[in-house]
């Protein structure tokens, strides 16, 4: 079969690899019908060293079950399923607490690097299939597929940011980042009833979508100027919750300047730094809390799916480019060049 491999920064190839096979009785084999390129894939695309490649890529996918191990009971051959970006059994003590990204029984929690499998491919072996896969009540060619695919990562991640931040109808929220996760953080804050949602982004096509999703204001400035503008919009105090959906130090510093005393910075952008200021002069002095982390999206799928099925929300609007597997390398470049917001891959 064919699959996407990253050899080094800027070097993504679609190559033939061995077909996946059942290795454990809890496995399933899934023929992938839809996948995508994630903003987090752009970090290694910009920095991967040749000695760290080749690496299988892709951690968001929908597909049809082709075969199952003898112990799999919740899905069967022919089922259309969505897979979260983290593998889990959905039964251990951490999963029962909604922390599927810390599943005690997943030998490798994440796709691509750790699981040595990838969703940007023709097929994949899914470990712990009963816990990981969620059956979808639509046909593979449904118009809802793009939106349902966001349950695999970006919608669940934006929602996790809002939930971890404690967003509700009494909170003012700032979302830093106009990528897919940031935009779906806006949608999530709106869904949770936030009264004011400020989106910090500078790409108009994206911020226009952010307004459609529920942003009440847009601030295009960054750094001190951006912080000042947000504070001006919030009576000088800043917002109760800041969703940091980028992952670099400037975004974190922006978040610390925007959050109001007693507020929460909820980080879901994959951190590209090891140290974040949390001392007296930054968070401690004003009782500011730091939350977030890798989103346990499996915990949110059943909660969010009905609103997609009934048309209340359409998170799939973050996909502005569609290609096939052969177009994945160009899709990476287009996303890196900000020509595409998020690339949908149809097999």
Image (cartoon, rainbow, N blue to C red):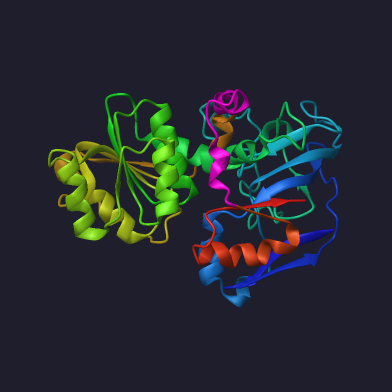
Residue farthest bottom in this picture: 50
**Residue 180: where, in percent of width, then height?**
49, 48
In-image side of 325 versus 294 (left or right) = right
**Residue 211: where, in percent of width, then height?**
39, 40
Decide if residue 215 is in sight here. Answer: yes
121 part of magenta stretch: no
Q: Give the range drawn in magenta.
A: 302-320
At 85% across and 33% down in the image, what residue appears? Answer: 78
Q: Is residue 336 above or below residue 25?
A: below
**Residue 28: where, in percent of width, then height?**
80, 39
Front residue of this view, candidates 233 and 288: 233
304 part of magenta stretch: yes
What is the number of callouts on the image?
Answer: 0
At 21% across and 52% down in the image, what residue appears? Answer: 227
Quadrant in which the N terminus appears: bottom right
Q: Main secondary structure of the magenta part?
A: helix
In-image side of 332 versus 69 (left or right) = left
**Residue 38: where, in percent of width, then height?**
57, 53
Indicate the quadrant where residue 247 lies.
Answer: bottom left
At 81% across and 60% down in the image, what residue appears? Answer: 2
Front residue of this view, candidates 183 and 39: 183
């Amino acid at each position: 079969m064919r699959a996407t491999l990253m050899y080094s920064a800027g070097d993504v190839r679609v190559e033939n690899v061995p077909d996946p096979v059942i290795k454990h009785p809890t496995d399933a084999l899934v023929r992938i019908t839809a996948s995508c390129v994630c903003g987090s894939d752009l970090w290694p695309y910009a920095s991967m060293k040749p000695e760290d490649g080749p690496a299988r890529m892709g951690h968001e996918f929908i597909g049809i079950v082709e075969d199952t191990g003898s112990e799999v009971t919740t899905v069967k051959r022919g089922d259309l399923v969505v897979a979260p970006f983290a593998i889990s059994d959905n039964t251990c003590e951490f999963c029962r607490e909604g922390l599927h990204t810390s599943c005690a029984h997943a030998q490798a929690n994440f796709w691509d690097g750790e699981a040595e499998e990838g969703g940007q491919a023709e097929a994949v072996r899914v470990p712990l299939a009963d816990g990981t896969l969620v059956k979808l009540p639509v046909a593979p060619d449904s118009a809802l597929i793009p939106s349902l695919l966001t349950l695999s990562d970006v919608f669940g991640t934006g929602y996790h940011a809002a939930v971890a931040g404690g967003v509700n109808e009494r909170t003012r929220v700032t979302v830093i980042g106009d990528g897919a996760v940031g935009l779906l953080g806006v949608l999530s804050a709106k869904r949770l009833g936030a009264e004011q949602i400020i989106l910090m982004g500078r790409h108009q096509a994206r911020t226009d979508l952010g307004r459609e999703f529920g942003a009440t204001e847009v601030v295009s400035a960054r750094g001190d100027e951006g912080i000042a503008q947000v504070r001006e919009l919030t009576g000088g105090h800043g917002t109760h919750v800041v969703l940091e959906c980028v992952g670099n130090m400037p975004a974190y510093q922006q978040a610390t300047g925007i959050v109001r005393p007693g507020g929460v910075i909820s980080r879901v952008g994959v951190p590209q730094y090891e140290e974040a200021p949390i001392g007296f002069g930054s968070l401690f002095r004003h009782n500011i809390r730091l939350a977030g982390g890798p989103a346990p999206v499996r915990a949110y799928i059943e909660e969010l799916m009905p609103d997609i099925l009934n048309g209340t929300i359409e998170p799939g609007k973050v996909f502005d480019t569609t290609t096939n597997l052969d177009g994945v390398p160009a899709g990476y470049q287009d996303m890196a060049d900000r020509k595409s917001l998020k690339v949908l891959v149809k097999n």
